[in-house]
Image (cartoon, helix red, strand yellow):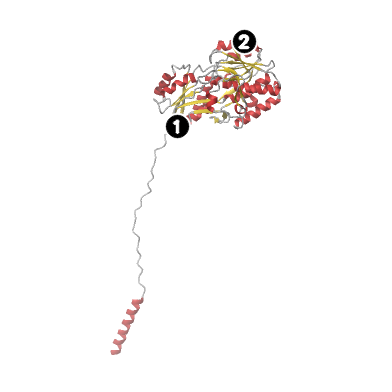
Amino acid sequence: MKKFYVFAAMLLVASMTLASCAPATPVVVKPPVVETQPPVVETQPPAVEKVATFAIEHFSVIQGTTWSGAHDRAGKRIAEKYPNVTYIYRENVGPDLSVPYAEEMIAAEGANIVVGNAEFMGLPLIDIADKYPDVYFVSIIASDLSTKPNFIRIFPRQYQALYLEGLIAGALTETGNIGIVSAFPCVQVIRRQAGFILGVQDAAKLLNKDIKVYVKYAGGWYLPQEERDIAATLVDQYNVDVITQQTDSGSTLDVATEKGIWFVGKDMDIVGFYGWSSTDTVAVSFDTRWEVLYERIVQAWLAGEKNPETVLYLGMESTMTLADGTVEPTVDLMNAGKIGIDAISPKALPLIPDVIIQLVKQRREQMMKGEWDPFTEHEFLSNGTGLDMEGLPVPAKGTVVKPAGVVPTIEWLLSQFNFDLAGTIILE
């Protein structure tokens, strides 16, 4: 019995020892539960597309004019491309009406951009620019370069296309006499005529011709009867067989058609757009796409620019893509819907030597690339005639005002080009 108790005691000690050596039951510690929230996303209200009302004050009627007709077409093309832009206009706006009409269109029709499409009636808009700081006002440049942050000045480098026209006109004349029915002496007119005259003179040198260019002023931009009388005088008294104009009615073209001489057009493709005359009379025209400049202005306004570019002087290197996908430069040769060399009348083309055709093609391509410009390459030699301006008399005849190869500044071209080029014959 004593042995039994001893054995039991030993068994109890052994079991306790084994129990103390057994591994402990693992304790699982659960992480605390954290209640999560979805990330906070700051939402912005959907952007409201800005809308603009684009207003043009036309100094003349639209129908039957190349200048206001081109501006009107530009307004329509802008509205076609931009659904959030509406085009409105007024016609026959003089300088005494430009401000009242502008304020009427701003108040009644929500105009945000107001254009005066000639300087003499566009300049008064500067007087209300501060009154309407959220409106862009725009004026064509004739010679004044006044600007404000919301008063923008524009003009296309039409002289580039006019130079190409001069090459063609110089090749076509058989009498050696070319006429220009012009408005009145001003920087804008003189500069544009210079582009044409440089082209004529280059053609004369290449073809060994003696060519005279006659200019006679009508006294205004749109004087149909006076323009007709001048055109008839140039043909009948000065034996002109190629004629062009720096005026806005169709009278010069009418005379060219009646007299059976070549006409060189300006501002618009008058055959293709208006159906005026035909390529039997219109040797070539150039087309001005004001919409290329207007698009820059519209885009700046829609972007909320408070300090947009205030002087725009764009040439053939600048383009716009129209609503239908057509890419067009600011100015280009255009006739009966065709452009470039193809714009030359099929009747005129065989009369033009290939050396001129190839030069027109080459210079056009170079200007579109921004690689060449007639006003940079040529010397400016004063004819001694032009427009005396305050503090800027016409340079004496024979004065080299700008040497060949020198780039004239935009400011000089737009506001100080006040003399005719040597060789121009100004008729009284």
Q: Position of residue 142 (x, y in %)?
A: 52, 21
Residue furthest bottom in the image: 2
The residue singled out by tag 2 in the image is: 233
Would you call the spot at circle 1 few (<14 residues within 10 Å), some (14-19), or many (20 or more)?
few
| Mark 1 secondary-structure assignment | loop
Q: Quadrant of the N terminus?
A: bottom left
| Count of labels in the image | 2
235 relative position to 130: left or right: right
Q: Position of residue 12 (x, y in %)?
A: 31, 82
8 relative position to 210: left or right: left
Which amino acid does the dot numbered 2 rest on? Thr
Which amino acid does the dot numbered 1 rest on? Asn
Q: Is residue 371 above or below residue 213?
A: below
Out of 325 and 162, give the one closest to the viewer: 162
The residue singled out by tag 1 in the image is: 307
Would you call the spot at circle 2 few (<14 residues within 10 Å), some (14-19), or many (20 or more)?
some
| Mark 2 secondary-structure assignment | helix
Q: Position of residue 156 (x, y in %)?
A: 54, 25
Q: Earlier in the sequence, mark 1 or mark 2?
A: 2
Q: Quadrant of residue 161?
A: top right
